Image: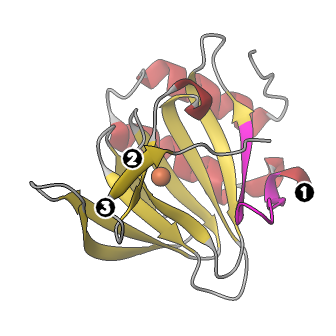
């Protein structure tokens, strides 16, 4: 399914992303995302809805007909987040409203993962991830946070893993997308 981008800001962003090309220049993709992330005239109440059970809402804005170049708004509930996970594709994230804390993790040679540093993402701040990179996201504030996520491929069409640091286990990371 190719989602039709109605708002001019969104249509412009999709054209820019197509012109830059898939994953070729993540900083350029980030600059394009930042403009749309800070100009929020196109954002609707639907984009801010949170799946209470999941702790965040993931909303598709557009994707290509073959599921490449998929853009989402993710809304994080206060005090909630996503467990350590990888992405199966490249990604660029830009903060829109509020603050979310990204924590990096690295794979231990013998198995399991080890916690790295934290990076607080606020409006206009960028994060890039490669297919194998592992991070967790937590909204440590008392207000919702939203961010704009561009991935090389729609997350329903890549194999992603979630990691349990305490148990040392890996399982499929499946997110409900609205
Ligand atoms: Fe992620």
x 56%, y 24%: residue: 157
For label 1, the residue is 45
25 w.r.t. 4: above or below: below
x 35%, y 47%: residue: 129
Q: Residue 111's image quarter?
A: bottom left
Asked if marks 1 and 2 touch (Cβ < 8 Å), the reply is no
Asked if marks 2 and 3 touch (Cβ < 8 Å), the reply is no
Q: Residue 33's image quarter?
A: top right
How is colour applied across the structure in the image? secondary structure
Label 2 to label 3: alpha-carbon separation? 15 Å
Give the x, y percent position of residue 97: 67, 70
Q: Is mark 2 within 8 Å of ligand 1?
A: yes
As drawn, the label of residue 168 is 3
Give the x, y percent position of residue 142: 70, 88
Q: Residue 144's image quarter?
A: bottom right
Label 1 or label 3, whichever lies nearer to me, is 3
* Residue 52 counted in the magenta span: yes
For label 2, the residue is 86
Instruction: Please tell me how crowded label 2 is: few (under 14), some (14-19), or many (20+) other residues with Cα within 10 Å.
Output: many
86 w.r.t. 25: above or below: below
Mark 3 falls on what kind of element? loop
Residue range (magenta) = 47-60
178 w.r.t. 124: above or below: above
Instruction: Please tell me how crowded label 1 is: few (under 14), some (14-19), or many (20+) other residues with Cα within 10 Å.
Output: few
As drawn, the label of residue 127 is none
79 w.r.t. 153: above or below: below
- Near-viewer residue (131 or 19): 131
x 84%, y 59%: residue: 49
């Amino acid at each position: 399914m190719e989602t039709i981008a109605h708002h001019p800001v969104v249509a412009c962003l999709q054209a820019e992303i197509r012109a830059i090309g898939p994953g070729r220049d993540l900083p350029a993709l980030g600059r394009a995302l930042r403009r749309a992330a800070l100009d929020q005239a196109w954002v609707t109440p639907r984009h801010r809805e949170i799946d209470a059970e999941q702790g965040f809402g993931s909303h598709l804005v557009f994707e290509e007909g073959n599921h490449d170049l998929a853009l989402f708004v993710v809304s994080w509930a206060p005090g909630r987040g996503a467990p350590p996970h990888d992405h199966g594709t490249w990604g660029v994230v830009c903060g829109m409203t509020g603050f979310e804390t990204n924590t990096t993790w690295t794979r231990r040679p013998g198995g399991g993962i080890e916690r790295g540093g934290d990076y607080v993402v606020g409006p206009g701040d960028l994060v890039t991830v490669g297919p194998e990179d592992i991070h967790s996201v937590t909204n440590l504030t008392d207000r919702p946070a939203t961010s704009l996520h561009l991935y090389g491929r729609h997350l329903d069409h890549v194999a992603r893993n979630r990691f349990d640091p305490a148990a040392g286990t890996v399982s499929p990371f499946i997110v409900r997308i609205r």
